Image: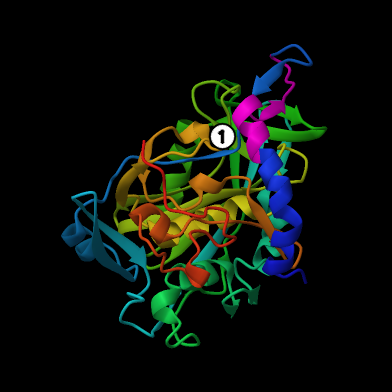
Amino acid sequence: MTSPTFSVKLFVPLIAVVMVLTMTLGLSLSLTTGTHAAGVKFHAQPRFFHFANRASDTAARAATTRLPYWSSSFTSGGTHYTYSMVGTNPTNSTATTTVPTSIVPLKVTFSGGRTFDGTQKVASTKASPIFQRASFSVGTSQYGDAIQRAEFWKYVSWHPSFYHVLLGAPTVTPTVNITVPAAYGSTQNSGGTPIGVIDLNWFDAHIQPLLTSHHFTTNILPVFLTYNVFLYQGDPSNCCIIGYHNAVTNSAGLQTYIWASYNDPGIFSVPIEDVNALSHEVSEWYNDPFVSNAVPPWSVPSEPQYGCTNLLEVGDPLVGVVFTVNGYHLQDEAYFSWFARQRPAIGFHRQYTYLGTFTTYSPSC
């Protein structure tokens, strides 16, 4: 097992180099496909997608979802902001919350016949710190819970063994087969690894009906799992989205869900692999389950793909900043204090991210 502290010492110098290269050159992904000449360079950055605010009214959420969540607010720069997060309020609770979870493996077949089967990575995903207890700086727990505890450490440290927000041991549904028409996806190659790329809108339109057909209730977190499959917007060269989380209203009520791709090493020029995309999305789901939390506008030069944004999406400022636990690649996450521009920070060791990558709160834009 590699502890987070040990990994930080090894990886932070590398990340500094990666961030400089990102700012000056951008991340490139070399793709070849049957519809493009071999060797064509597509400029791509690993990124995550955000759907429009679909659940901004707290009263409506309370009436239509069974997901346990809490709401609060803060003021910054004279503006009042409200937000909701999964679990119970860490400022006044010592409760343990456990959210039932279900993994839906997707077997994706493209028009040329190549198949990418998420079923192959179910066991590895279940064995990862996303679902299993591991050693973190704030104790032994799951990754998402450790991040939440560290994020609000000023409050939970009074009773450090009590406050938790956990994912239940996941059930696994039968594999879902998805066939992608040539007009909406293709197979390509990155760093010698075959990958599949799919139009985002086409893909999500095929995911949402599964929420109903699988009879998920709104207290459950469904996780749709692919393997080496990514999404694009508009054109395959505009790749690669590697995960998202969303909240939609269906017959069950307001349902949250995650899609993330388990991926092999070497596809991107930063060490994004195995459950890294899922770690990003799980932490963001904890902090913004209904995709509705607004914060003071921020931007960071190392993640130009997001521009100037006002979303409380804790993974976006740190895409590619990685630490390893038990051999899995997990992402650093920005804390609430970074978005709320609090000084001092309320996080563990008064840090603004789990690894301490940022030394002050978010820059305005």
- For residue 38, side relative to residue 247 (left or right): right
Badge 1 density bin: few <14, some 14–19, many ≥20, Cα 10 Å: many
Q: Quadrant of the C terminus?
A: top left
Residue 242 at x, y percent in the picture: 58, 42
Residue positioned 56% across, 24% down in the render: 238
Residue positioned 56% across, 69% down in the render: 170
277 magenta-colored: no
* Quadrant in the rendering for residue 62: bottom left
Residue positioned 57% across, 54% down in the render: 357
Residue 214 at x, y percent in the picture: 46, 58
31 magenta-colored: yes
Residue 18 position (above or below residue 153): above
Q: Nearer the viewer, residue 77 or 327?
A: 77
Q: Nearer the viewer, residue 339 or 173?
A: 339
Residue that mark 1 sits on: 231
Residue 92 at x, y percent in the picture: 30, 81
Amino acid beneath label 1:
Leu
Question: Magenta segment, which residues?
Answer: 19-35
* Quadrant in the rendering for residue 3: bottom right
Residue positioned 45% across, 75% down in the render: 153
Considering every residue shown, the one lying at the far right of the view is 192
Q: Is residue 307 visible?
A: yes
